[in-house]
Image: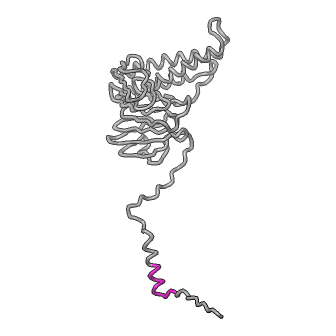
Amino acid sequence: MVVAVACEQAPQPTAATASASASVSAAAVPAPSASTAPVRPRVAPATQPGCRVLSLKGEVKGPSGPVPNGGVLYGTEWLELGKGSELSLRHTVSTRELTVKGPGKALPCLDGDEEVLLVEGTLETGAGAGARPGAEVVIYTSFGTVSYGDAQIAIRASKGRIEIASSKGEAWIRPTRGVTRKGPEKLVGGNDKATLTAAVRPEAALQDCERAAGEAESLGRAVFSPAPADGGTLGDRAAAHLVARKTARAACGSARVGIAGEADAEKRKGLEDRLAKANQQWQAVGPPGSPAAKSSAP
């Protein structure tokens, strides 16, 4: 017996069906929305350590003009922040982040380092990103320094008063001479707070800087001099010099912040000239007659 099996051939699409199918497929792909954010233009790569501008709100400008969004700041210019302005930054090497809010005046990422000079305004830091053992961030104010390794803190600076609060992590407060501190020297998080108050006194702060710079220079010379009878070992003298340099750097940094807030231009220029000489002093680490290290340190 022969069994015949018939296979039904699939119908071929007509021109009308093909057109309709194409229309449905096209409709299934959503058209670009008019509100879609534009592609952010490429930003120039950092040529050396500095701070990348992550976001910018309001008016922020320096001597060379407005700060560009996405640009890199190398810590060489004071910035003026208008009322309601915000500048969020990320260090190009460590990836630490911080935000400066106006109105105020600041010099973030001093010479590309993780240091900030804050005259007025609010500075907020983030915890976690970029933190690593032994790496410390230093914030210079006219009344002293605030330093931290991994912390979320807020510093509000105004004439005559600095407010510091830590919501997470540890921060150390080191006031300059004549400053009154209310609260602990070490903040440990949990909204721990402290305040620094004093009369505005750039001249006195500069004198402290000059004194510390002279001490650092003297100890630096001693490192390269024959061991005196009571000078200890070379290691002892080198350690003392290192501490003196750190002290001078902090004192001169706070002095620089106070000088930047001086309204009298002629007086400010004279103080700046003295500060420059003091910075050269504490950076002089070679034997007598050797040039000081080149740096625009605070």
The colour scheme used to paint the residues is one colour
Question: Relative to 29, does residue 18 appear above or below in the rendering?
Answer: below
Task: Give the residue displayed 65% in from the left and 5% down from the top.
Answer: 229
Q: Of all residues shown, which one is farthest toward the front?
A: 1
**In the rendered image, which quarter is residue 123 located in?**
top left
Q: Residue at x 47, y 48 (%)?
A: 70
Q: Is residue 47 left or right of residue 271?
A: right
In the displayed orientation, state which residue is furthest to the right.
226
Q: Position of residue 132 (x, y in %)?
A: 55, 33
Q: Is residue 280 above or below residue 27?
A: above
Is residue 272 at least partly visible in the picture?
no
The secondary structure that most of the magenta stretch takes on is helix
Q: Nearer the viewer, residue 163 or 126?
A: 126
Image coordinates for residue 57, horizontal then vertical, percent: 37, 46
Count of number-bearing discs: 0
Q: Position of residue 257 (x, y in %)?
A: 41, 28
Question: Is residue 50 a member of the stretch shown in magenta?
Answer: no
- In depth, the one of 105 and 167 nearer the eye is 167
Is residue 143 visible in the rendered image? The answer is yes
Q: Is residue 289 above or below residue 63?
A: above
When asked about the image quadrant of residue 10, the answer is bottom right
The residue sitting at the top extreme is: 229
Indicate the position of residue 233 as horizontal and vertical percent values.
65, 12
Q: Which residues are magenta?
A: 12-22
| Image quadrant containing the N terminus | bottom right
Query: Residue at left 42%, top 58%?
Result: 37
Of residue 131 and residue 246, the one placed in the foreground of this image is 131
Asked if residue 14 lies in the magenta stretch, the reply is yes
